[in-house]
Amino acid sequence: MGMGLLFDATRCIGCGACSSACKEQNKLPGKVEEVLTAYTWTTVKEKEGTNIRRLCMHCEVPTCASVCPVAALVKTPEGPVVYDAKRCMGCRYCMMACPFEIPKYQWDSAVPIVGKCILCAGRLKEGLATACATACPVEATTFGKKEDLIWEARTRLRTKPGAYVNQIYGLTEAGGTSVMMISNVPFEKLGLKSNLPAEPPAMRTWQVLSNIPDFVGVWGVFLYGVHWITARRERVADATNHDNGREDRS
């Protein structure tokens, strides 16, 4: 099952330490914003008297990865859905496909890329917890093996039935996610989608693709276009870095 996060809304005090730690860990510019952007990958907002986090849910079968034509998004065995900016062609299919509406685009950049939480994939490989879980002063966000987090969430719901809505958000939504949440307020009132199917949306993508007739010729043209766009992005990036280097020397 890999690793994941459990967020307990009843414990969150809204301090924003998780958002600040995410900024620092991923070297994201600017201040923490109130909504998710390409530069703010997790937020904490107060709704219905309860604080709720927003971040990439890291689906077990990620739809974003299923629609990406260049494999810029991949689900790792450790749990994170990671993003490779060097592969990205800027099509933004991931933004349209995500059932949680998470990925954001750098509209203000000369060489724009997609921004979203990567569940501190580098830290996980080193055996460390995510930066957000480490920074949380009240353990509202807990890091661990997904099966252990499910057990912990079920234990809290069972032992304090009046303190929680009887639901683990992310357990079945969109086929299950590596980030799960429990709360004392119904999740739809906290701004989270409550009508997501238990079947991964990615399965529909693969079913459609498997039924498309012979498209080798079209696919070849498409891949050439992908190559051209990717190469152009690299040239623009190199030119931008070169210009910045000249400005620094001057």
Image (cartoon, helix red, strand yellow):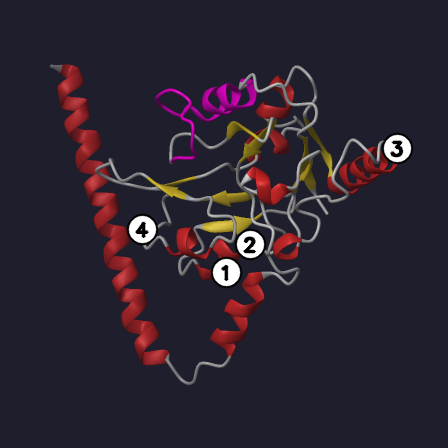
Q: Please report the residue visible at 73 percent of the width from the left and 41 percent of the height from the top.
A: 146
Report the residue marked by disc 4. 90
Bounds of the magenta segment? 17-37
Q: Which residue is mark 3?
A: 159
Q: Which mark is residue 62?
A: 2
- Gap between marks 3 and 1 measured at Cα: 39 Å
Closer to the N terminus: mark 2 or mark 3?
2
Does the magenta run of residues contain 160?
Answer: no
- Residue 120 visible from this viewpoint: no
Q: Which residue is mark 1?
A: 66
Q: Position of residue 111 (x, y in %)?
A: 25, 40
Q: Is residue 28 part of the magenta span, yes or no?
A: yes
Who's the residue at 69% across and 39% down the image?
3
Q: Which kind of residue does numbered mark 4 sit on? A: Gly
Q: Are marks 2 and 3 in contact (CB under 8 Å)?
A: no
Identity of the amino acid at label 1? Ser
Residue type marked 2: Pro
Please state if 101 lies on the left or on the right of 183 as rendered.
Answer: left
